[in-house]
Structures are given as C-alpha cells and as structure tokens.
Image (cartoon, helix red, strand yellow):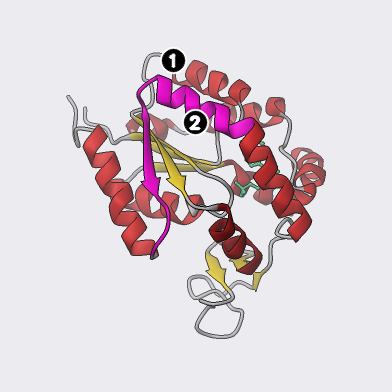
Amino acid sequence: MTRGPRVVLLGKQGAGKGTQAVRLAGHYGLAHLSTGDLFRAAVRAGTPAGLDARKYMDAGDLVPDGAVVRLVDEQFAANDGYADGFVLDGFPRTETQALALDRILADSPLDVALDLNVPTEVALARLTGRRVCEQCGAVYHVDLPPRHGWTCDICGGSVVQRDDDTEEAILRRLELYERETLPIVQRYRRQARLVIVDGTGTEDEIFQRVIAAVDGRCTPARA
Ligand code: AMP
C-alpha cells in the first residue's frame, strides 16, 4: 500500500499555516486536521466542548491540553484516512501535545515538521487585516477581499473578522507561541524532522517552497 506524507505545519499565528495546509492537503490528497477549525465548528454548534473552548479562544489563550488531545484522539480514531498521510495545522502547540502526538502515531512517526517562518510585523499585518468565511473558513484580507462584497467566493458565506483577531488577543497568541510552541520547534529540530520554510512572499511562492520541502523529505510513494 502507498501513502502520502505525514506533515506537521508549525509557525506563529499569521504565518499562513491554514492557507498552506489546505493547499498541501489538496496537492497530496492528505487528510487535513486543523484544531482551530474544529474548535470553531464546536463553538458554532454550541457543544459543551465548544462552549468551554470559546473563553480561551476569545482571549487568545490556548485551550487546555486535555481537551485538545481528546479532540485529536477522536479524529484519528474516527477517520482511517489519516493512515494514508495527513497535514496537522495548529497541532501540536505545546510539549504535552507533541508527546501525545507521538503516542497517537505510535510506530508511524512524522515525516516532516515544517516551520513557516515570518517576521512578527508581517504576521501582525496579516492578522489584523484577516477576514474569514464564517461557513467554510476560507481566508481573505482587507487588501485582498472577496470579489463580491464580503461574501465568500467559494461558498457564498459571510466573510467576517474572527472574534479572536483583536489586537489584544493577537499579541497574547504571539506571546504564547514563543513560550509554548517554540520548544517543540526545537524538539523537531533535535529529531532531525524540522525544515524551516520562508513564509514571506505570495501565496504561490510560499506553496512552491512548501512542496519542495515536503518532496525533499518524503519519497512520494512507499511500499
Ligand atoms: P488557530 O485557528 O489555529 O489560530 O486556533 C484558534 C484558537 O483555537 C487558538 O488561539 C486557541 O485558543 C485554540 N487552539 C487551536 N489549536 C490549539 C491547540 N493545539 N492547543 C491549544 N489551543 C488551540
């Protein structure tokens, strides 16, 4: 049986993980898991997990590890597709989550952890101008809006500013990235799984770098 690459996308908020993760999943036919998208869907559905997560999200705080790991465990248990390769977007974000991921993956470890690297001022400009589709999660920017007003080009949903894209919450998320997530970047570096990708430039330029990095680390098909 052949399988696609097993990829973790790292990078501070505003690095473009969400956009590149969707493209990467499409390119290789991978399962795409975004913990942020799953929490936002749970908030919209008003589930107990969503209501609980919301207060952390709105403040720019991390949802506690237990709830995050439970969510990821459930996704892997419910979807055989992960065995054929995946891209994880926004997970892991702490050392506890990285350890939990090792346990979930057991004897089929990651192929590559990509660190999308952008200067903080670029991330800040992207986040403060970011607008997202409430329905499908497509990402726009005030400088690159949808074609027809604030209606999503893909699904027709309303394009709005995320509740957690306030300046205060953005700064909090960037601070937490330094404190909680940078240690796992070092962890993947020690494991020789880390590839740093320049996250500046156009979406297409970045995508070409992302594909080159994954191709460079993975044989496209394995027996
Ligand atoms: P994102 O869309 O990845 O920026 O995630 C939005 C928010 O969801 C984050 O600011 C956190 O509050 C929460 N979240 C998403 N993924 C995680 C995670 N792996 N660990 C903790 N909180 C998370």
Measured as percent of width and height from the top left, residue 58 is found at: 78, 51
Label 2 SS: helix
Residue for point 81% across, 39% down: 52
Q: Earlier in the sequence, mark 2 or mark 1?
A: 1
Q: Which residue is mark 1?
A: 106
- Can residue 78 be seen here? The reply is yes
Give the total number of marks visible in the rendering.
2
Q: Which residue is mark 2?
A: 185
As drawn, the residue found furthest toward the bottom would be 148
Measured as percent of width and height from the top left, residue 101 is found at: 51, 23
78 relative to 20, above or below: above
Q: Which stretch did the figure color magenta?
A: 180-201
Q: Amino acid at mark 1?
A: Ala
Residue for point 62% across, 21% down: 96
Q: Report if residue 164 lies within the magenta region.
A: no
Q: Residues within 10 Å of mark 1 (few under 14, many from 20)?
A: few
Q: Amino acid at mark 2?
A: Val
